[in-house]
Amino acid sequence: MPDRLPMGRTCIVVADGGRARVFLLEASETLRAPFRLVERGALDNPDLRSRGFSATGRPPTETNSGREAGPVHPMGAQRERHGIELERRFAMEIARKTAALVESWSDGVVVLVADPRMLGLLREAARAALKPGVRVKELAKDYTQLPVTALHDLLVQSGVMQGPPARPTQP
């Protein structure tokens, strides 16, 4: 992501297959960090956990230990397709919630930060849900589990946000 974002209307969505967090970039009172991330929502994908998928949206691994079992049964491929469909539905829900949050915007930027697989699903859903004047930018990283200060620091380092890190770095 080479160019930095305008700070007026910026929404950052951090997601993986099982969880999403939505932030707005808002003005801060301090001169040291003129902008800060404010979490405006969090979503969990209940479909994945209730159907035996892990928190990341991946099915648990299976081993084929029987000697006469032969090649792995094609059920694994079907389970993978089913997992992708569940993630696609979750991406659509994330896009709907994000679109509702930025509904009053006629322009601005929504930054999608997700692992490459989820990013592809989110890209499609977000472009369909957002107004035409709202741009979509992407960063292929999985930062879902990070605390806000670490997320802020990594977004500054990657060029998404301007300013110094949220906390001083240790020498």
Image (cartoon, rainbow, N blue to C red):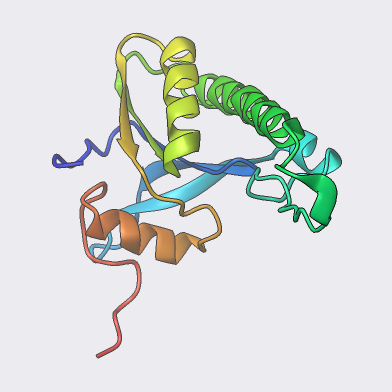
Where residue 60 sits in the image (x, y, percent)?
A: 73, 51
Residue 42 point in image, percent of width and height: 63, 42
Q: Quadrant of residue 7?
A: top left
* In the foreground, 141 or 12: 141
Q: Quadrant of the N terminus?
A: top left
Q: Quadrant of residue 16?
A: top right
Give the percent coordinates (x, y) of residue 76: 71, 37
As drawn, is 46 to the left or to the right of 26?
right
Residue depicted at x 22% and y 38% = 5
Question: Taking 37 as reference, is 89 above or below it?
Answer: above
Q: Where on the picture, by quarter, is residue 74?
A: top right
Q: Is residue 79 left or right of residue 36?
A: right
**Residue at image x 38%, y 44%?**
26
Q: Is residue 16 visible?
A: yes
Q: Is residue 114 visible?
A: no
**Quadrant of the image containing the C terminus:** bottom left
Kindly give the residue lying farthest to the bottom in the view shown.
171
Q: Position of residue 130 (x, y in %)?
A: 44, 15
Indicate left or right for 103 with 85 as reference. left
- Horizontally, is 40 left or right of 63 in the view? left
Residue depicted at 37% across the width and 53% down the height:
36
Residue at left 42%, top 66%? 150
As rendered, which of 23 and 70 lies closer to the eye? 70
Is 118 situated above or below 64?
above
